[in-house]
Amino acid sequence: MCNTQTLARSADGYIIRCTECSRIQLAFGVVAVTLRPHQFQRLKEYADMEQEYRSEVFPGPGQKCVSLPVNRTLTLCLTLAELQSLTDLLDQAAGLIAVYELLA
């Protein structure tokens, strides 16, 4: 990444973006991946859908019950708590991206 701006961060990870090439780096848990803007948007949509529809499912605590495709070769396997943390990070980052686009 070149010249970065922090879009979101928490104890679970962070999301940064290069101001020159617009690539986004997501670090969450033990995974760090660089995404193009459309891949980031797709991941956010998948996470939002899983968050909405998985809320009715009650797996055991700590059970990895959510699979989110990040790109062609990477899928995140998450617990419901991890899904909530990731969704929070993605929401914060998407909000800042929208603000930065308005200011540009």
Image (cartoon, rainbow, N blue to C red):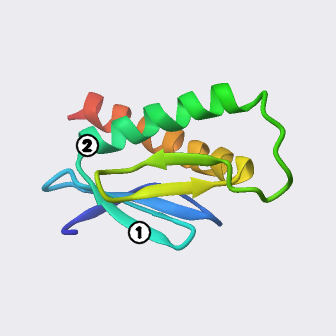
The residue depicted at 31 percent of the width and 38 percent of the height is 100
Q: Which mark is residue 32?
A: 1
Which of the two residues, 26 or 99, is positioned nearer the viewer here? 26
Which of the two residues, 38 or 22, is positioned nearer the viewer here? 38
Amino acid type at image mark 1: Ala
Amino acid type at image mark 2: Pro
Residue named by callout 2? 37
Local secondary structure at mark 1: strand
The disc, 1 or 2, on the residue closer to the chain's N-terminal end is 1
**Mark 2: few/some/many CA within 10 Å (<14, 14-19, 20+):** some
The residue depicted at 57 percent of the width and 56 percent of the height is 77
Residue 96 appears anywhere in the view? no
Q: Which mark is residue 78?
A: none
Q: From the viewer's perspective, is residue 92 above or below residue 21? A: above
Q: Is residue 81 left or right of residue 34?
A: right
Q: Residue furthest bottom?
A: 30
Local secondary structure at mark 2: helix
The residue depicted at 70 percent of the width and 53 percent of the height is 79
